């Protein structure tokens, strides 16, 4: 593995840095599964914009060079940084939608907004919470959240489960704060709980695509709900869950019930990595399938196993949300 | 930056001046409060030195993402950070690293910031849930610190010599061999046990008698800790790496081992230095200056 390009950049070749960043930006634009923020199809100009944005941030410019040890790792880190720029924009959009939904829920749940922007439970004092955001964040991680994603074409909607999770999170925040919290803080804390936190500058994470909407679609007529409850479509649910899994989590599906060592052996991973990914997969199952009864859950898991069955072609896999 | 979509984007040189100066500078000896890029093989991590004895450093990893810390990750504000932007010190992932992994000295933090770090009052919530993305960040940092903590020199052709078996095969005992090579039997036995490294001169005499390459006799034993200490000086890292590349070595650890055993072990040079460490430093510098 050579480091000629990395060394030339460190020695002072700014043009070399520009070329390699632009190359990786083009690669991201042409290969990413992420939707284009703002909609529409990816275009060549987007690569230039991505590269330009990268160079406006001293932190990104320096951190990438400090993390890389050769040209291959430089390219890999650049790809991660540039793709994360896109993810961050998508997360910002989702976060804005969450904020609007939270404001509706706070109103529906009879919280009091006083002064403007600051919300407290009716039984709590109106004085602002003087503690740290970390305390509120820690409280949200204690709440078991059901992450049923709302989709236009889903055959099963469970808006009350989704709503209930959001309300539980708000209650946890209110209980911990014991006072008024600004809506931006509430939004940040809830967003982080849903995996919409700030992304690291250069660290490549095992992430699912930033596609699904976490917002609650609102109440559904009772009769329609009953009909949906009677006819769970395991395949549709499996496709939805599959779309939310990261690449490593997907590979773990067939081995989720095996020991960490055996799972690692099958996947060619060490025990540490296998254990971590297995835990994340279990937690995702709990969050997205926890509201199902045993029979329904098993049906969905069977469908997931089929999706990840070795030999299934990429053409047969569900495509990512766009 | 020209707003011309036909020309590649380029960095603002001002964003890189300080970094480039740091890479070009001669690295100092480690000291508390320093921020280094630590690196060994393909692993790199920014670290803050909390303690050092010259052989190893107790160091906490640093990342630039201040929003992703846990309850033990302390922020160093932008005015206290040598980067000009705030960084996060993960005190919960502090590890003992050998000095050999210190690569580029990037600056220092002041006493007030150091005291805040040592207070270990982190800015974030504890990481308790497997779906918390910070868990992946923390795990990745932890893995790198472990790799750096375990950085050792490795000979690409390490061999294990059983000296006792070799003597027996040639019909020697330590008592019979000792007068032939001009040392006490006790020294032969200490070398056979691996308690000491044979001198180059002894290796030159023993080798032909036992049918072993003198270099293999030297290479199979632990290196003199003072020799290792000298090779691990941060100030020698870049010149050694440059020489390694010139000599066709990709692995800087293997190159150090090669120089230590093949080049310096047979050096007959005697200096007037007062300590073995100074002597070895002199030998290494002479080797680097010689070509």
Image: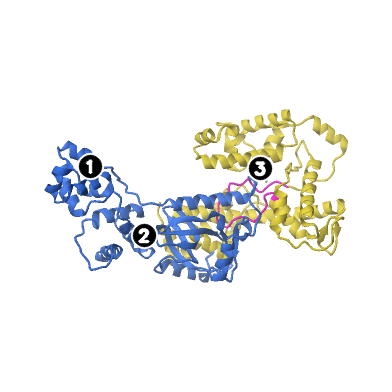
Chain colours: A yellow, B blue
Residue at the image position 66 percent from the left and 32 percent from the top: A301
Q: CA distance from mark 1 to mark 3?
A: 61 Å
Tell me the element at label 1.
helix
Q: Are marks 2 and 3 on the same chain?
A: no
**As rendered, which of A55 and B290 lies closer to the eye?**
B290
Tell me the element at label 3.
helix
Q: Which residue is mark 2?
A: B232
Highlighted range, magenta = A193-213
Q: Residues within 10 Å of mark 2 (few under 14, many from 20)?
A: many
* Image coordinates for residue A269, horizontal then vertical, percent: 50, 39
Q: Is residue A318 above or below residue B49?
A: above
Q: Which mark is residue B163?
A: 1
Tell me the element at label 2.
loop
Note whether residue B192 is visible: yes
* Image coordinates for residue A27, horizontal then vertical, percent: 54, 52
Q: Is residue A297 above or below residue B26?
A: above
Q: Which mark is residue A244?
A: 3
């Amino acid at each position: 593995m050579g480091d000629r390009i990395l060394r030339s950049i460190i020695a002072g070749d700014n043009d070399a840095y520009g070329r390699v960043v632009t190359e990786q930006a083009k690669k991201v634009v042409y290969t990413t599964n992420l939707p284009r923020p703002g909609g529409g199809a990816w275009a060549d100009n987007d690569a230039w914009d991505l590269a330009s944005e990268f160079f406006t941030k001293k932190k990104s410019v320096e951190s990438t060079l400090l993390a890389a040890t050769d040209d291959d790792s430089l390219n890999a880190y650049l790809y991660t940084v540039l793709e994360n720029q896109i993810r961050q924009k998508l997360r910002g959009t989702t976060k804005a939608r969450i904020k609007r939904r939270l404001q509706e829920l706070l109103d529906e749940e009879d919280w009091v907004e006083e002064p403007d922007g600051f919300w407290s439970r009716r039984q709590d004092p109106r004085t602002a919470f003087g503690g740290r955001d970390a305390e509120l964040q820690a409280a949200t991680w204690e709440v078991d959240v059901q992450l049923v994603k709302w989709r236009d074409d889903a055959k099963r909607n469970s808006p009350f489960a989704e709503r209930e999770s959001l309300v539980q999170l708000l209650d946890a925040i209110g209980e911990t704060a014991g006072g008024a919290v600004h809506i931006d803080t509430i939004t940040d804390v809830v967003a982080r709980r849903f995996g919409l936190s700030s992304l690291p500058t250069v660290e490549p994470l095992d992430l699912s695509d930033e596609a699904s909407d976490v917002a609650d679609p609102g109440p559904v007529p009772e009769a329609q709900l009953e009909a949906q409850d009677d006819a769970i479509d395991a395949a549709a649910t499996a496709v939805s869950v599959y779309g939310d899994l990261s690449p490593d989590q997907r590979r773990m599906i067939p081995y989720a019930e095996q020991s960490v060592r055996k799972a690692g052996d099958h996947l060619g991973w060490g025990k540490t990595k296998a254990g971590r990914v297995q835990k994340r997969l279990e937690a995702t199952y709990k969050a997205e399938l926890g509201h199902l009864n045993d029979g329904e859950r098993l049906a969905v898991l069977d469908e997931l196993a089929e999706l990840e069955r070795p030999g299934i072609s990429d053409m047969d896999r569900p495509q990512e949300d766009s | 930056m020209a707003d011309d979509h036909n020309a590649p984007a380029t960095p603002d040189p001002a964003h890189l001046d300080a970094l480039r100066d740091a890479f070009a500078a001669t690295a100092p000896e480690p000291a508390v409060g320093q921020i280094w890029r630590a690196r060994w093989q393909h692993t790199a991590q920014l670290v803050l030195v909390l303690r050092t004895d010259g052989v190893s450093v107790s160091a906490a990893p640093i990342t630039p993402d201040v929003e992703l810390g846990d309850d033990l990750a302390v922020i160093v504000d932008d005015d206290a950070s040598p980067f000009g932007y705030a960084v996060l010190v993960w005190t919960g992932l502090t590890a003992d690293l050998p000095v050999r992994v210190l690569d580029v000295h990037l600056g220092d933090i002041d006493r007030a910031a150091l005291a805040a770090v040592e207070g270990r009052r982190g800015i974030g919530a504890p990481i308790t849930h497997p779906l918390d993305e910070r868990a992946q960040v923390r795990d990745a940092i932890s893995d790198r610190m472990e790799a750096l903590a375990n950085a050792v020199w490795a000979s690409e052709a390490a061999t294990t010599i059983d000296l006792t078996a070799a003597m027996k095969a040639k019909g020697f005992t330590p008592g019979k061999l000792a007068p032939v090579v001009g040392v006490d039997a006790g020294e032969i036995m200490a070398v056979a046990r691996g308690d000491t490294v044979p001198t180059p001169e002894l290796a030159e005499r023993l080798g032909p008698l036992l049918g072993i390459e003198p270099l293999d006799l030297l290479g199979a034993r632990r290196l003199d800790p003072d020799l290792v200490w000298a090779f691990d000086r941060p100030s020698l890292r870049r010149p050694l790496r440059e020489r390694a590349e010139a000599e066709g070595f990709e692995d800087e650890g293997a190159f150090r081992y090669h120089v230590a055993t093949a080049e310096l072990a047979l050096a007959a040079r005697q200096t007037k230095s007062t300590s073995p460490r100074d002597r070895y430093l002199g030998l290494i510098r002479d080797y680097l200056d010689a070509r």
